[in-house]
Image (cartoon, grey):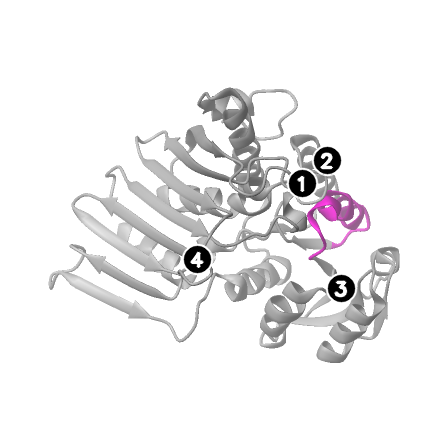
Amino acid sequence: QVRLGIIGCGGFARNVHVPNILLNNKLCVVAACDLNLQHAEAVQAQTGARYATTEPGRIFADDQVDAVLIATRHDSHAVLSVQAAEAGKHILCEKPMGLNMAECRRVAEAVQRAGVVYTVGYNRGLSPLVVKAKELMAGSLAKKMIYHRIQAPFPESHWTHVPEIGGGRFVGEGCHIFDLFCELVGAPPTSVYAAGGTFLDPERVKIPDSAIVTLTFADGSVATTLIASDGCAEFPKEATEIYWDGKAVYISDFREMSYHGVIADGEGRIALKATDKGHRREIDLFADAILRGTPSPNGLENALRAALISFLVGDSLATGQAMAINAAANNKNCPVDSK
């Protein structure tokens, strides 16, 4: 088993990650850490961990911990990832990888020096329905057109909107969708263009919070996402539409899927018992990467790719111009391999 320390024991860790870990016999939680000791103790009780602490350093120094799950607020992801790597711990870090490319570069360098497994929490591409969609498209060289909606009410008071803490909506959550597009297309992304701004109260939210973002790809594919912070709680949060070679796939909230023109009888449908955004598969593949040496899900290359796109969204909004991804990748300050 992978002996896991959880750093950041808020609601997301307790309600999403821990239940999936408890269902997986490849991992066991041995330590829990949070600035709020009661949250750490709640995870300790939930998992049977050996101890709860408010000090991440205790987990990094513990030779009975093989790997860490970092689920803290965004501004601490990079520094904790670097510390974990330097301590020789494998890392599953929630998105984003960092709040700027300098932070992401430091994480990549630390991980490479230490030779540890690294996974960032872009889970959408690991959803069972997305995996099925990729299977349906396998072998086709046709260009794809993709649309994804992600809308929800993100109140002005939410910490994601604070640049130095959450990084904003595109860095803090949009990275999920940029990674999803790259996984669905399979070809390298070449440019990103964004149009939008601040749709919430500008007196309280000082950075852009909503946009329509379009990515182009080396094979001619195009993908567009609508990211809306002033959204409607009564309407489904996410939907994905994929069109290629006279065929179509529609995924609703990662729970229901229909596909058309792919099979002989014309139409297929899949309905899961519950929404599955890929968190369970992410945990399982992370464990396999440590135990069996298989590829890490969303390792450094994928982590850096979507991070770069998320930062370029801000540049595009500021300049009104499309941003060339390859040019950005060649910048000495960016750790993305330009190949």
Q: Distance between the residues labelled 2 and 3?
A: 22 Å
Rendered position, 58 above or below 173: below
Q: How crowded is mark 4: few (under 14 residues within 10 Å), some or many (20 or more)?
A: some
Using the rendered view, name the quadrant where residue 237 is placed: bottom left
- Say whether disc 4 or disc 2 marks the residue closer to the N-terminus: 2
Residue that badge 3 annotates: 5
Q: How far apart are marks 1 and 4 (CA)?
A: 25 Å
Using the rendered view, name the quadrant where residue 166 is placed: top right
Rendered position, 270 above or below 132: below
Residue depth check, mark 1 versus mark 4: number of the one nearer the observer? 4
- Compare residues 191 and 152 and report the one nearer the observer: 152
Q: Is residue 15 left or right of residue 77?
A: left
- Say whether disc 2 or disc 3 marks the residue closer to the N-terminus: 3
The kind of residue on which mark 3 rests is Gly
- Say whether disc 3 or disc 1 marks the residue closer to the N-terminus: 3
Image spot of residue 298 (x, y percent): 54, 49
What's drawn in magenta, residue-wise? Answer: 71-89
The kind of residue on which mark 2 rests is Arg
Q: Residues within 10 Å of mark 1 (few under 14, many from 20)?
A: many
Q: In which quarter of the image is the N terminus?
A: bottom right
Q: Distance between the residues labelled 3 and 1?
A: 20 Å
Residue that badge 1 annotates: 98
Mark 1: secondary structure = loop
Q: Residues within 10 Å of mark 2 (few under 14, many from 20)?
A: some
Residue that badge 4 annotates: 237
Q: In this view, does 206 lie to the left or right of 88?
A: left
Residue that badge 2 annotates: 106
